[in-house]
Image: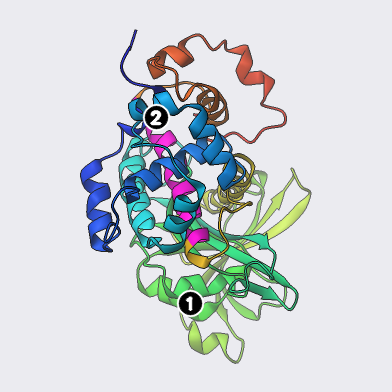
């Protein structure tokens, strides 16, 4: 029996203090701070995520109730809501964005051996954006429509582990496709996108960077067929063509051939048209790749359902971005813990158990050793499951 460390302290022990303090020093995060450091701010906000706190007062009351255990959990004294509010308002959100990236770099190799069932020796990413509605009167910087506020999370995930590798947080007015202007493509990788990203000038930049894209075509696409390749129609592929764009503008901004694949999905009884710059992979593999785009939708739904990114503890842009990036850090940290400790439960089950046991002095492996297998089935019908691999 572990008599010294709380469950929360065991989770935090997976983090690198040196990496965190490098991020803090990069932005002078602790300048002028005497007691409530960036590390304490991170711990407090991580606690709020893991225990589903709803407000600053909620955080303060719950931590005060565990006052005698705070030191053993890594906290240095009681947390006041005014102090936490000031920290979220003034500490640079990029500290936590950079730290989240260090955790992502740790998590990705842990899931690199996940078998997707695709005969492709390349990394596959899914790119999309989600909107989080806000009250415009409280968040005037987050303009979306005339009387509505929102922020957008532009996210690209590595589908092998549902690990986000790129996140950009903007106001709601920013169009989804604009994220391609700041995205640094990885040569030889696949980026799967929906029709909202169909901008041939930007797609041609991906092509020139030796990155592959898979995207749905629009109905009004103007093109000329150059070649038709043989297909096995029993796989659902109806045609596999090499085309040239013939639109007045598209023919100039994307002068190279594109592959056009027509695929019929029996599951949804719908014909889908895909465009890609990969001419070597089987057509059925390209169609299968697009199905994995749902992973990013699942990621958005999951974090909205299980993390605190729809109700914010502050109204400033810095406070909102700080909360989102710490939520992402917690998500990735639990993914790391699951792999490193060899936990078999899905992420939903892990978080539910942790939310009730953070201040218990029990080894984490003991917490999950007694969870019956049938418990996994109890939440499978109505809950979104990630890392169930």
**Is residue 146 toward the left or the right of residue 244 in the image?**
right
Neighbours of disc 2 within 10 Å: few (<14), some (14-19), many (20+): many
Residue at left 39%, top 64%? 211
**Magenta segment, which residues?**
319-340
| 2 or 1: tag closer to the N-terminus | 2
Residue at left 36%, top 39%? 112
Q: Main secondary structure of the magenta part?
A: helix
**Is residue 285 toward the left or the right of residue 67 in the image?**
right
Q: Quadrant of the N terminus?
A: top left
Which residue extends farthest right? 269
Residue 202 image label:
1
Instruction: Please state the horizontal and vertical placement of residue 247, each as a whole percent of the image.
Output: 62, 87
Residue 70 image label:
2
Whether residue 92 appears in this view of the structure is yes
Residue at left 30%, top 38%? 15
Residue 78 falls in which quadrant of the image? top left
Whether residue 157 appears in this view of the structure is no
The figure's colour scheme reads: rainbow
Q: Nearer the viewer, residue 187 or 82?
A: 82
Instruction: Please state the horizontal and vertical placement of residue 245, each as a whole percent of the image.
Output: 57, 81
């Amino acid at each position: 029996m572990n008599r010294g460390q709380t469950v929360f302290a065991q989770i935090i022990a997976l983090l690198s203090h040196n990496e965190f303090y490098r991020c803090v020093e990069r932005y002078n995060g602790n300048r002028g701070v005497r007691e409530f450091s960036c590390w304490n701010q991170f711990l407090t906000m991580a606690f709020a995520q893991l225990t589903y706190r709803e407000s600053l007062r909620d955080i303060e009351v719950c931590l005060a109730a565990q006052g005698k255990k705070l030191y053993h959990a890594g906290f240095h004294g009681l947390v006041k809501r005014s102090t936490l509010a000031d920290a979220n308002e003034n500490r640079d959100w990029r500290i936590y964005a950079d730290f989240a990236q260090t955790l992502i770099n740790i998590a990705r190799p842990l899931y690199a051996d996940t078998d997707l069932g695709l005969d492709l020796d390349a990394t596959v990413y899914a790119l999309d954006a989600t909107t989080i509605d806000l009250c415009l009167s409280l968040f005037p910087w987050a303009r979306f429509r005339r009387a509505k506020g929102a922020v957008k999370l532009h996210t690209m995930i590595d589908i092998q582990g549902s690990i986000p590798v790129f996140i950009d947080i903007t106001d709601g007015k920013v169009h989804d496709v604009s994220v391609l202007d700041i995205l640094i493509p990885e040569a030889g990788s696949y980026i799967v996108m929906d029709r909202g990203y169909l901008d041939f000038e930007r797609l041609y930049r991906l092509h020139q960077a030796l990155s592959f894209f898979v995207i749905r075509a629009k109905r009004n696409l103007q093109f000329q067929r150059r070649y038709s390749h043989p297909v096995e129609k029993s796989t659902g592929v109806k045609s596999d063509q090499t085309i040239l764009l013939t639109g007045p503008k598209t023919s100039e901004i994307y002068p190279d051939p594109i592959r056009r694949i027509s695929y019929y999905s029996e599951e949804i009884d719908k014909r889908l048209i895909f465009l890609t710059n990969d001419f070597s992979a089987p057509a059925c593999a390209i169609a299968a790749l697009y199905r994995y785009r749902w992973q990013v939708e699942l990621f958005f739904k999951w974090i909205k359902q299980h993390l605190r990114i729809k109700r914010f503890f502050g109204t400033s842009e810095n406070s909102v971005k700080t909360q989102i990036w710490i939520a992402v850090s917690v998500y990735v940290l639990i993914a790391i813990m699951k792999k490193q400790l060899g936990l078999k439960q899905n992420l939903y089950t892990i978080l539910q158990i942790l939310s009730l046991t953070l201040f218990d002095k029990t080894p984490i492996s003991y917490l999950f050793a007694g969870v019956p297998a049938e418990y996994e089935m109890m939440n499978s019908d109505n809950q979104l499951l990630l890392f169930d691999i």
